[in-house]
Image (spheres, grey):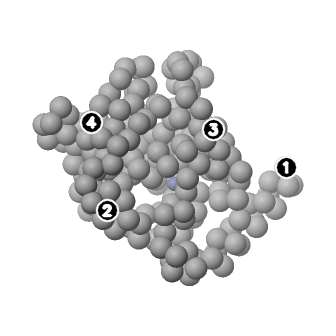
């Protein structure tokens, strides 16, 4: 089932996700619904907060974007990043690797807003997958960026928090409009 994507101004986006102790049938259903929602919205990553659940759960599939390379290492060996797509991360712990690099980002909770965000080039990731197994890998490029963007969501952090002051100033009228529209819509419910 496609879920509605929560927009900037919805307080759930600022909530830190709680750990997912077990992959229950409810969690499995939520994962399936999140993939459906992400694909319908043409996104490459979606965090549980963005569909109204403050949980340590995110889904990622970078395959639709072909012009921005990704890297993946399993136990120090380079492998095809597509081999772990679609990717479900429960309770991810990420450790930054390398110097910050700038890259363009958008977010389904901020329609039509884009900015250059600086993030470490790669990340070491440990998480639980949808089968309850522990997975560990190093991801870089687009995938590394996407994982950092999504794990930020799981901690209530949004990409506007990581923008340059200039970009944020420039986008402020749009951000204020979006926040007001979201709050007005929430009030009507
Ligand atoms: Zn986002």
SS label for mark 3: loop
Q: Is residue 4 left or right of residue 134?
A: right
| Residue wearing tag 3 | 54
Q: What residue would you read off at disc 2?
A: 100
Specify which label sits upstream in the sequence, 3 or 4: 3
Residue 129 locus on image (x, y percent): 40, 27
- Say which label, 2 or 3, has the lower sequence index: 3
Judging from the image, what secondary structure is the residue with disc 4 in? strand
Q: Residues within 10 Å of mark 2 (few under 14, many from 20)?
A: few
Outermost residue to the right: 188
Q: Which residue was labeled with disc 1?
A: 189
48 or 153: nearer the eye? 153
Task: Report the residue that reaches farthest toward the left.
Answer: 77
Between the C-alphas of marks 3 and 4, the distance is: 25 Å
State the residue at coordinates (58%, 79%): 169
Crowd rating for badge 4 (residues with CA inside 10 Å; few <14, some 14–19, many 20+): some
Q: Are marks 2 and 3 in contact (CB under 8 Å)?
A: no
Between marks 4 and 2, how big is the CA–CA gap?
19 Å
């Amino acid at each position: 089932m496609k879920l509605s994507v929560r927009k900037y101004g919805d307080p759930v986006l600022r909530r830190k996700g709680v750990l997912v102790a077990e992959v229950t049938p409810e969690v499995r259903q939520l994962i399936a619904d999140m993939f459906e929602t992400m694909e319908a919205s043409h996104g490459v990553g979606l965090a549980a907060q963005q569909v109204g659940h403050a949980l340590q759960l995110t889904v990622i599939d970078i395959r639709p974007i072909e012009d921005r390379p990704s890297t993946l290492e399993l136990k120090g060996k380079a492998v095809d990043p597509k081999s772990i797509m679609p990717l479900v991360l429960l309770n991810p712990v990420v450790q930054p690797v390398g110097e910050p690099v700038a890259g363009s980002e958008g977010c389904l909770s901020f329609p039509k807003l884009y900015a250059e965000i600086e993030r470490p080039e790669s990340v070491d990731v440990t998480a639980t997958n949808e089968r309850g197994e522990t997975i560990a890998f190093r991801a870089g490029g687009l995938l590394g960026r996407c994982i950092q963007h999504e794990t930020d969501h799981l901690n209530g952090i949004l990409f506007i928090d990581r923008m340059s002051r200039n970009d944020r100033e420039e986008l402020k009228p749009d951000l204020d409009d979006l926040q007001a529209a979201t709050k007005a819509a929430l009030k009507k419910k």
